[in-house]
């Protein structure tokens, strides 16, 4: 009849912002929750214990902040390393002189899975790149591996409205750009 019917597939999630798989053949789906957790959907249910819980370092207090991205590299099955993008609760990058300091640094970090493939080690964090954000919006946050093996990221234009600090047009700033990162182990 051409009628479209929506049917819930997952429940029990809190502010999900992204869904991906690890490319490891496990058929698990990983759900990023804005407040700082990554949950696994496996065998038709959301696993009770989070895959990753970094709420202690994620700033989710503003509408465009939080844990915003998750990417698994092509060699995840062998390395156990994966990457997240989030806005930090505390300053990670050096604040830029003359800009308001919102305590909202965009952060890309590498983590490793533990002995249990459904639980990552939150203490394994290695910050790959941190960028001071002058405002609490326009943070970007999506990360993804390209076919060339590089990690691609965007940090947004720095916020407010209309890019008042001109970051997107400033080649000396990472804001307002697509960034390609070599994440060699």
Image: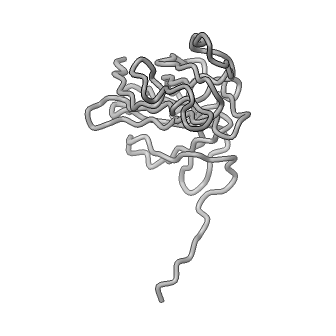
In the figure, 125 relative to 85: above or below? Answer: above
Q: In the figure, is residue 57 to the left or right of 73?
A: right
Q: Residue at x 60, y 10 (%)?
A: 97
Q: Is 104 or 49 nearer to us in this picture?
A: 104
Tell me where residue 145 appears, x and y as whole percent.
Answer: 36, 35
**Looking at the image, what colour scheme do you see?**
one colour
Q: Residue at x 60, y 12 (%)?
A: 95
In the figure, 28 relative to 35: above or below? Answer: below
Tell me where residue 73 appears, x and y as whole percent.
Answer: 37, 32
Q: Residue at x 45, y 33 (%)?
A: 154
Q: Is 109 or 140 nearer to us in this picture?
A: 140
Quarter holding the C terminus is top left
Instruction: Tell me which corner region of the image, top left, top right, bottom left or bottom right, holds residue 107.
Output: top right
Residue at the limit of the structure toward the right, as seen here = 61
Tell me where residue 133 appears, x and y as whole percent.
Answer: 59, 24
In the figure, 60 relative to 121: above or below? Answer: below
């Amino acid at each position: 009849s051409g009628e479209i019917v929506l049917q819930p597939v997952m429940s029990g999630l809190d502010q999900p912002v992204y869904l991906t798989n690890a490319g490891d053949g496990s058929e698990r789906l990983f759900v990023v929750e804005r407040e700082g957790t990554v949950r696994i959907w496996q065998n038709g249910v959301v696993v009770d214990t989070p895959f990753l819980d970094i709420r202690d370092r994620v700033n989710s207090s503003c509408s465009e902040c939080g844990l915003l991205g998750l990417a698994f590299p092509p060699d995840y099955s062998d390395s156990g390393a994966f990457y997240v993008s989030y806005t930090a609760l505390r300053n990670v990058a050096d604040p830029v002189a003359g800009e308001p300091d919102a305590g909202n640094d965009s952060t890309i970090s590498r983590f490793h899975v533990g002995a249990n493939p459904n639980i990552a080690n939150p203490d394994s964090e290695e910050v790959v790149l941190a960028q001071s954000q002058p405002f609490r919006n326009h943070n970007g946050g999506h990360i993804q591996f390209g076919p060339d093996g590089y990690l691609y990221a965007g940090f947004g234009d720095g916020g407010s409205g209309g890019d008042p600090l001109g970051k997107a047009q400033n080649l000396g700033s990472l804001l307002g750009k697509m960034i390609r990162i070599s994440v060699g182990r």
